[in-house]
Image: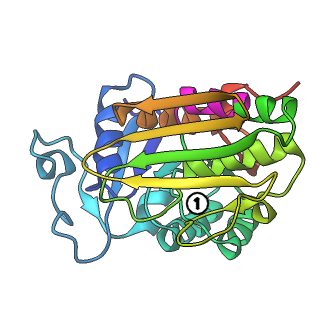
Amino acid sequence: MTDLPGIVITGASGRMGQMLIRTLAESPRAQLIGALERPGHDWIGQDVGRAMGGAEIGVTVTDDPLEAIARAHAVIDFTAPAATLEFAILAAQARVVHVIGTTGFEAEHLTKLDAAARHAVIIRAGNMSLGVNLLTQLTKRVAAALDEDFDIEIVEAHHNQKVDAPSGTALMLGEAAAEGRGVALERASDRARDGITGKRTRGHIGFSAIRGGDIVGEHDVIFAAAGERIVLRHIATDRAIFARGALKAALWGLGRKPGNYDMIDVLGLGDN
């Protein structure tokens, strides 16, 4: 076990944190060496396996990211933008692979991540699943093939605890559609329609967000023209797909040159 790459999981008590820990526990290719939580959390000082309601696994939850990340080969991070920026600085200092599933970043956050990526491998994606990344590539190609007679709408649904909208996956799909059309998403994005909004702007990309229950993740990309619609859809029913993708990304990043990467790179789905 000691020869296996050591992985640190941030946000250990969260939905994705716990799923990542379970996935690592079952993996023959990597080992969990650190579990991070925010200061004051009830899990601090407990064995993470016991905190999750199972058997002890020999990893104690800590609020000291410096010590944990310094010992790691990679850190997998599904938290919040402010926390992710802190982890990115530490990962860059330690030259540790940083896999980021966090969403909700602003432009200034991404600038800081770019700076960290000059020193370490950063793999960031709004969604870590194979299916969604295939959907992203399909979206770009369909958008490139169809003209603006086809309106593009992206509809996403998630559980009622999700704090950002549109989802990171929806924005990733929007970026793919915009790239296919040869436009900048920030100039062609329609969000949060309400009231008398006027007719739809030709060429814009619309977003709608649904929040309810325990929906893991559903995304539709709709290309709608007079008399016909094309609908590309992905439905996630188990968060394990994201955990498996994140672990795959962490292992792929080992030994790579510093820089910004995404799951398209990890999965080899980029245009050749």
Magenta-highlighted stretch: main secondary structure?
helix
Residue 27 picture location, percent across and down: 37, 26
Q: Is residue 185 above or below residue 145?
A: below
Specify whether residue 21 is painted magenta. no
Q: Is residue 55 left or right of residue 162?
A: left
Q: Is residue 135 above or below residue 106?
A: above
Q: Is residue 212 left or right of residue 267?
A: left
At x 51%, y 74%, the residue is: 82
In the image shown, does 96 or 11 lie closer to the viewer? 11
Q: Is residue 223 left or right of residue 162?
A: right
The quadrant of the picture occupied by the N terminus is top left
Q: Is residue 136 left or right of residue 7?
A: right
Magenta-colored span: 128-138
Residue 269 picture location, percent across and down: 73, 26
Q: Secondary structure at mark 1?
A: helix
Residue 185 is at least partly visible in this image: yes
- Please identify the quarter of the rendering in which residue 41 is found: bottom left
Residue 116 picture location, percent across and down: 70, 64
Residue 96 is at least partly visible in this image: no
At x 36%, y 32%, the residue is: 240
Say how many tags the image has: 1
- Please identify the quarter of the rendering in which residue 250 is found: top right
Name the amino acid, label 1.
Answer: Ala
Q: Which residue is mark 1?
A: 91
The quadrant of the picture occupied by the C terminus is top right
Q: How is the image coloured?
A: rainbow
In the image shown, does 26 or 210 lie closer to the viewer? 210
Q: Is residue 247 above or below residue 185?
A: above
